[in-house]
Image (cartoon, helix red, strand yellow):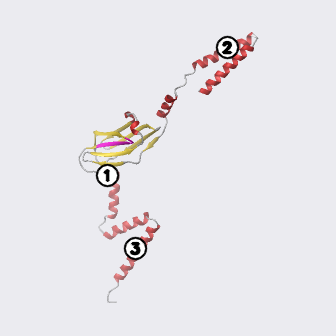
Amino acid sequence: WLLFRNQLQKDLEEVKELLTKATRKRLRDVLMTEKHKLELEIKNQPPPKPKDVAEEEKSSLGGYTVKINNYGWDQSDKFIKIYISLNGVQKLPAENVQVNFTERSFDLLVKNLNGKNYTMTFNNLLKPISVEGSSRKVKTDMVLVMCRKKREEKWECLTQVEKESKEKEKAAYDTSDPSEGLMNLLKKMYAEGDDEMKRTINKAWVESREKQSKGDIPMDI
C-alpha cells in the first residue's frame, strides 16, 4: 500500500513539473485533468494503520492450530484433573481459553497464544462426568481442566480406549498356564529389545532347554 501511494505522489509531482513547462492549451488541459485525477486518488487512499493495530489484526487471524499431546493428570474423590503446560497462557484474555464438556468428553481450545491456536480433545472418558460441575482454571504457564466425577470412585485411567488396551495386554500374559504367560512375556521382550536383550534371552532359552533335557534323563541310566 505504501509503495502504491508513493508512486501516485511521484506521478503527481511529475505532472506539476510538466505543467510549469507546458505552453499549449490542449496539453495543459490534459495535464490539469491528470493532476486532479491523481490528487483524488491520493485523497481516497485509506490512512495507514498504526503498527500495533496491524500486528494485532494479523495475529488474531494468522497462525496455525497445534494439537496438544502432552499432559499430566491426577484425581481426587470428586475431580479428574488434567494439567496442560502452555507458556504465557495466563496473559491471554479469559475468553481465549475455552473448554466444552459433555458427559463423556471435553474439548479445550486456546486461541491466539503467541500466534498459534492450541486444541486438545478427550473422547470416551472412562466414566461419566458432570458438565455443570466441571470447569477450567488458568494458572501461570498452565491450564487445569477440572472434570467433576458423577460418582466418587477411583478411575484407573482416563479413557475407555486406555482401559481396553490395558485389559488386552494383561490378558496376553494372564493365562491359566503360567509357562504360556512367561513365553508371551519373553516374546514381547525379545521383539521390543535391543541386540543385547535378544542375546540374553537366547542364552537363557538355550540354558533352560539344556536343563530340561538333563532333567528328562532317567536317574538309573
- In the rendered view, tell whether residue 63 sits above or below residue 76: above
Quadrant position of residue 192: bottom left
Q: Nearer the viewer, residue 23 or 150?
A: 23
Q: Where residue 50 appears, x then y in whole percent?
A: 52, 26
Q: Which residue is mark 3?
A: 204
| Side (left or right) of 140 relative to 61 | left
Q: Which residue is mark 2?
A: 33
Q: CA distance from mark 3 to mark 1?
A: 35 Å
Q: Where residue 195 appears, x then y in whole percent?
A: 47, 67
Residue stretch rendered in magenta on the structure? 140-147
**Residue 42 lies in the magenta stretch:** no
**Disc nearer the start of the sequence (2/3):** 2
Residue 126 visible in the picture: no
Q: Quadrant of the N terminus?
A: top right
State the residue at coordinates (37%, 34%). 94
Q: Amino acid at mark 1?
A: Cys
Q: Which residue is mark 1?
A: 157
What secondary structure is found at the residue carrying circle 3? helix
Q: Nearer the viewer, residue 22 or 175?
A: 22
State the residue at coordinates (74%, 11%). 26
Q: Nearer the viewer, residue 121 or 75?
A: 75
State the residue at coordinates (45%, 43%). 66
Label 2 Cα neighbours within 10 Å, binned few <14 / some 14-19 / many ≥20: few
